[in-house]
């Protein structure tokens, strides 16, 4: 008799209540969402800093920022040599199931995790 066995890959994605957290290589948020959240938390972030936080290259961050700007989720204002970003909270989610929902409430929920909130004053090392 042949017994079906679960693969190691399937076992790796199981969640146990006593585990420190889920395992695996996937996540619930895209890199676009991570970049958007970084910009919402710190509108004066540099692409280099965002890339480091998200775990992607600076060039990938620049492409994602260009996408977010082109689609109206973020605006960019040049202030001296740096950029100042502003998130449009009324931008809509892109997935067909959720396209009627604005991104603002999602960003608010994700910002409740104790991470820094957007800065109200310029970075000391980044004066205009």
Image: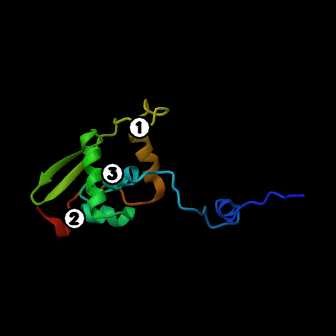
The x, y position of residue 127, in whole percent, is: 13, 64
Using the image, determine if residue 21 lies above or below residue 94: below
Q: Which residue is farthest bottom?
A: 125
Q: Residue at x 24, y 48 (%)?
A: 66
Q: Residue at x 34, y 36 (%)?
A: 91
Q: Secondary structure at mark 2?
A: loop
Using the image, determine if residue 117 lies above or below residue 96: below
81 or 12: nearer the viewer = 12
128 or 65: nearer the viewer = 65
For the C terminus, which image quadrant?
A: bottom left
- The answer to whether residue 80 of the structure is visible from this angle is yes
Q: Which residue is farthest top?
A: 100
Pair 1/3: label in front: 1
For the N terminus, which image quadrant?
A: bottom right
Residue 40 numbered mark, or none: 3
The x, y position of residue 78, in whole percent, is: 13, 52
- For marks 1 and 3, give the CA distance: 16 Å
The tag earlier along the polypeptide, 1 or 2, is 1
Q: Which residue is farthest front?
A: 1
Pair 1/2: label in front: 1
1 or 36: nearer the viewer = 1
47 or 63: nearer the viewer = 63
Q: Which residue is mark 2?
A: 123
Horizontally, residue 5 falls left or right of residue 42, namely: right
Rendering quarter of residue 5 = bottom right
The tag earlier along the polypeptide, 3 or 2, is 3
- The answer to whether residue 119 of the structure is visible from this angle is no
Rendering quarter of residue 80 = bottom left
Using the image, determine if residue 53 lies above or below residue 74: below
Q: Secondary structure at mark 1?
A: loop
């Amino acid at each position: 008799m042949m017994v079906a066995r679960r693969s190691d890959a399937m076992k790796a994605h199981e969640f146990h209540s006593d585990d420190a957290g889920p395992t695996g290589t996937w996540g619930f948020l895209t890199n676009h969402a991570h970049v958007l959240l970084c910009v919402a938390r710190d509108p004066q972030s540099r692409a280099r800093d965002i890339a480091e936080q998200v775990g992607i290259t600076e060039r990938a961050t620049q492409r994602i920022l260009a996408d977010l700007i082109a689609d109206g989720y973020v605006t960019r204002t040049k202030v001296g040599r740096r950029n100042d970003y502003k998130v449009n909270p009324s931008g809509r989610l892109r997935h067909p199931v959720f396209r009627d929902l604005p991104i603002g409430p999602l960003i608010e929920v994700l910002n409740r995790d104790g991470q820094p909130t957007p800065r109200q004053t310029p970075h000391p090392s980044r004066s205009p």
